Amino acid sequence: MASGQCLCGAVRFSLGVEPGFYYRCHCTLCRKQTGVGHNLATLVKARDFRWEAGQGAITSWRKASGYRNDFCSGCGSTVPNALRETPYYWIPLGLLDGELSMECVGDFCTDDAMPWDEQRSERSHRAAPDSLEFLLQELQVSID
Ligand SMILES: [Zn+2]
Ligand SMILES: [Zn+2]
């Protein structure tokens, strides 16, 4: 079990699982999304995700490519989103409360990383994950 909320606390959610793994993405979009060099995120099954409050406060920005940034209209925090047409939710790590012990499974899009963004795990990938299945496998989330 884990829970999270945005900066202002309007958007809140809970997880039926305690995620153990996350990834870093250094792509240009994730850099702009976070305002720093990379994002940190994980995926959970939709059935393990629940909104507790504030869904109506969420604004969704989407690119034609499918990239999506959902954020709290009140405070601007990036919040979780349903991953396209899949039964999974994308979770930005910084929103999670409590001291979860988690491990990084890899870095993606390192070709796009800025020179000042130097942090890397042992498993660096120059591009994005080849497939959702690969990413789920890395994160040790079972595929339904
Ligand atoms: Zn907020
Ligand atoms: Zn990215």
Image (cartoon, rainbow, N blue to C red):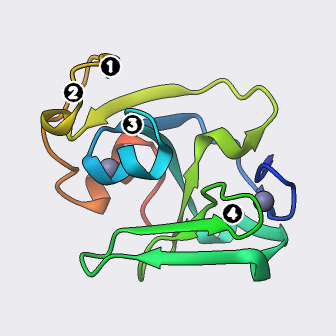
Measured Cα–Cα span from mark 4 to mark 3: 25 Å
Q: Earlier in the sequence, mark 1 or mark 3?
A: 3
Which residue does the image show at 26% across and 45% down from the upper left? Answer: 27
Badge 4 or badge 3: first in the primary sequence: 3
Residue type, label 2: Ser
Amino acid at pointer 4: Asp
Of badges 2 and 4, nearer the viewer stands 2
Residue 124's mark?
A: 2
Helix, strand or loop at label 4? It is: helix
Task: Describe residue 100's horizontal placement relative to residue 126 as left or right.
Answer: right
Say few, some or many: other residues with alpha carbon within 10 Å of mark 4 (under 14 / 14 to 19 / 20 or more).
some
Q: Earlier in the sequence, mark 4 or mark 1?
A: 4
Indicate if the residue with disc 2 has its beta carbon within 8 Å of ligand 2: no
Count of picture labels: 4
Secondary element at image label 3: loop
* Cα distance between the residues tagged 1 and 2: 6 Å
Badge 2 or badge 4: first in the primary sequence = 4
Front residue (pair 95, 50):
95
Write down the residue under mark 1: 121
Q: Kindly tell me whether mark 3's CB lies below 8 Å from ligand 2.
A: yes
Q: Nearer the viewer, residue 30 or 130?
A: 30
Residue at the (39%, 36%) spot, across then down: 38
The numbered dot on residue 38 is 3
**In the displayed structure, does residue 51 sit left or right of residue 95?**
right
Badge 3 amino acid: His
- Earlier residue among tags 2 and 3: 3
Question: Considering depth in this image, is 20 or 84 the residue closer to the camera?
Answer: 84
Left or right of 46 on screen, residue 104:
left
What residue is disc 4 on? Answer: 48
